[in-house]
Amino acid sequence: FPMAEPGGELLWFSPDPRGILPLDGFHIPHGLERSLRKRTYEIRINTHFETVMRCCAQREETWINQNIFESYVGLHELGYAHSVEAWDSKGLAGGLYGVALGGAFFGESMFHHRTDASKYALVALVNRLNAQSFSLLDVQWNTAHLDTFGAIEIPRQDYMERLKAALQLTCDFLDPQ
């Protein structure tokens, strides 16, 4: 995956170990389960892809520069990059974006303006990927936040085998099922 360095240079990363969120091992923390029952947010797909990317980039240190932004907008226009958005009465509350290829989804970034909004988007993403028979959710690096959902790190060789199998699948991220 690409990341922009502070000076603007684009670098490609392939961490070893690699962070994934096993779709069959996804865990919803108890506090979030209670929040989900309240249906605080409405989930939408691809309604404001560019806005989601801009919100993801609004942090002190960001790897999303103009080149990355334009590249992913191009992937979105081609039907490969997608946003999962959590909305409430005040507007876009949180979301995430990534790229779908075959049966793999490569999560790129997420943001929230209000409590649990990005978590709602993540739950919606996993539900969609499971419904469409995706087999791999790549989260690049594991974090303490993703760990609460069951994210793990696997060796590059294992990742490459899972990736090869996932790319053989024909999954449609946009199929509403």
Image (cartoon, rainbow, N blue to C red):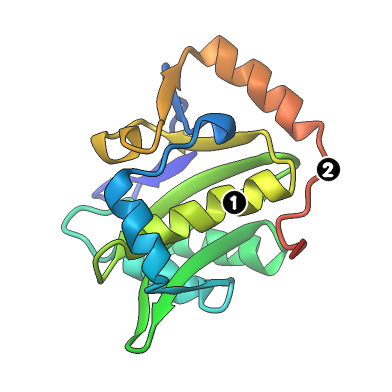
Name the secondary structure under disc 2: loop
Q: What label sits on residue 127 in the rendered view?
A: 1
- The answer to whether residue 65 shows anywhere in this view is no
Give the left or right position of residue 174, taking residue 64 as reference: right
Numbered label attached to residue 170:
2
Rendered image quadrant of residue 77: bottom right
99 and 143: which is toward the camera:
143
Q: Amino acid at mark 1?
A: Asn
Point 78% across, 47% down: residue: 171
Q: Give whichever of 15, 35 is nearer the camera.
A: 35
State whether residue 143 is above or below residue 173: above
Measure the alpha-carbon separation of dots 1 and 2: 17 Å
Report x, y in % for residue 9: 36, 46
Pinpoint residue 26: horizontal percent, then vertical percent: 48, 36
Nearer the observer, 174 or 28: 28
- Give the residue furthest to the bottom: 89
- The answer to whether 72 is drawn above or below residue 26 in the figure is below
In this rendering, would 158 be left or right of 34? right
The image shows residue 37 at horizontal and vertical percentages of 41, 64
Corner quadrant of residue 74:
bottom right
| Extreme residue in the left direction | 60
Q: Measuring from the top left, give residue 118's x and y in whole percent.
A: 36, 60
- Mark 1 residue crowding within 10 angstroms, few (<14) / some (14–19) / many (20+): some
Q: Above or below — where is 162 with respect to 122?
A: above
Residue at 27% of width from left, 41% of height from top?
Answer: 145
**Left or right: 99 as drawn, with respect to 89:** right
| Vertical comparison of 77 with 5: above or below | below
Q: Earlier in the sequence, mark 1 or mark 2?
A: 1
Which residue is rendered at x = 52% and y = 36% of the image? 138
Q: Is residue 45 visible?
A: yes
- Which residue is found at the position 74% from the left and 49% from the top? 132
Q: Amino acid at mark 2?
A: Thr
